[in-house]
Amino acid sequence: MSKPLIQLIDIRKKFQSGKITYEVLKGINLEVYMGDFLAIMGPSGGGKSTLLNILGLLDRPDSGLYLFEGREVNTFSEKELSRLRNQKIGFIFQAFHLIPWATALENTLLPALYGGEITKEKIQRAHELLEKLGLGDKKNHKPAELSGGQQQRVAIARALINNPTLLLADEPTGNLDSQSSEEVIKIFENLNKEGLTIIMVTHEREIAQRAKKIKFLKDGKFIED
């Protein structure tokens, strides 16, 4: 059997609030393989966003082992984590996080800019992604000139610009109407069919059911499916 893309072993995370310590993740074990489409569900405060931040190398666990493509990322420097994050992981958020003064095309190219340089190939890829996502006529529009669904599709294009191995989505349909939600989840399904590995946090059961696997996180632990 092939090795997991991601392997978490006994991942734990605490946060301090004044004199009180909250254990947010209480021994998470998880294996994600190439081509998986995993939805993570659970009540607010259960640790979903904390887990996603650790998976996305935005935060470090207090203890436990995180292997990404077989590499123990716990030992990486901040610079190494930043490079891995930029090259291998795409992020999509509930609130889009687009730069308001930048066009759809410029927003799409941001990770390429952070990665070092914007090449002709990256510009071509940005044009192709926006066309593929139905935004060919919106490339020079700024976020305020786009609907919520269109803004989220720009965010998807931005997440894909560096050809990531893994796509992480935190409540990607949370701010969208039902039609836009359906458009976004269909895009995810198509990307997954093309081989992209996706981990998505959602409160919406009907959205979660479109994934290949669902796991439930409650009180910092995965409970039985």
Image: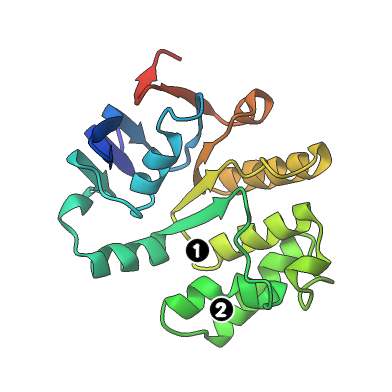
Secondary structure of residue under mark 1 = loop
- Disc number at residue 176? none
Percent position of residue 87, x then y? 40, 66
Q: CA distance from mark 2 to mark 1?
A: 10 Å
Q: Indicate whether 31 appears above or below 175.
A: above
Secondary structure of residue under mark 2 = helix
User: Is residue 79 or residue 26 the one in the foreground?
Assistant: 26
On the rendered structure, is 2 left or right of 73? right
- Disc number at residue 163? 1
Quadrant containing the N terminus is top left
On the rendered structure, is 145 left or right of 41? right
Percent position of residue 35, x then y? 47, 41
Q: Residues within 10 Å of mark 1 (few under 14, many from 20)?
A: some
Q: Residue at x 24, y 65 (%)?
A: 78
Amino acid type, residue under disc 1 in the picture: Asn
Q: Residues within 10 Å of mark 2 (few under 14, many from 20)?
A: some
Q: Residue at x 47, y 37 (%)?
A: 36
Percent position of residue 55, x then y? 36, 46
Q: Residue at x 84, y 71 (%)?
A: 137
User: Is residue 5 or residue 12 the one in the foreground?
Assistant: 12
Q: Residue at x 34, y 26 (%)?
A: 220
Location of mark 2 (residue): 122
Q: Indicate whether 117 appears above or below 74.
A: below
Judged from this view, the residue extending furthest toward the front is 18
Residue 135 lies in what quarter of the image? bottom right
Q: Indicate whether 160 appears above or below 213.
A: below
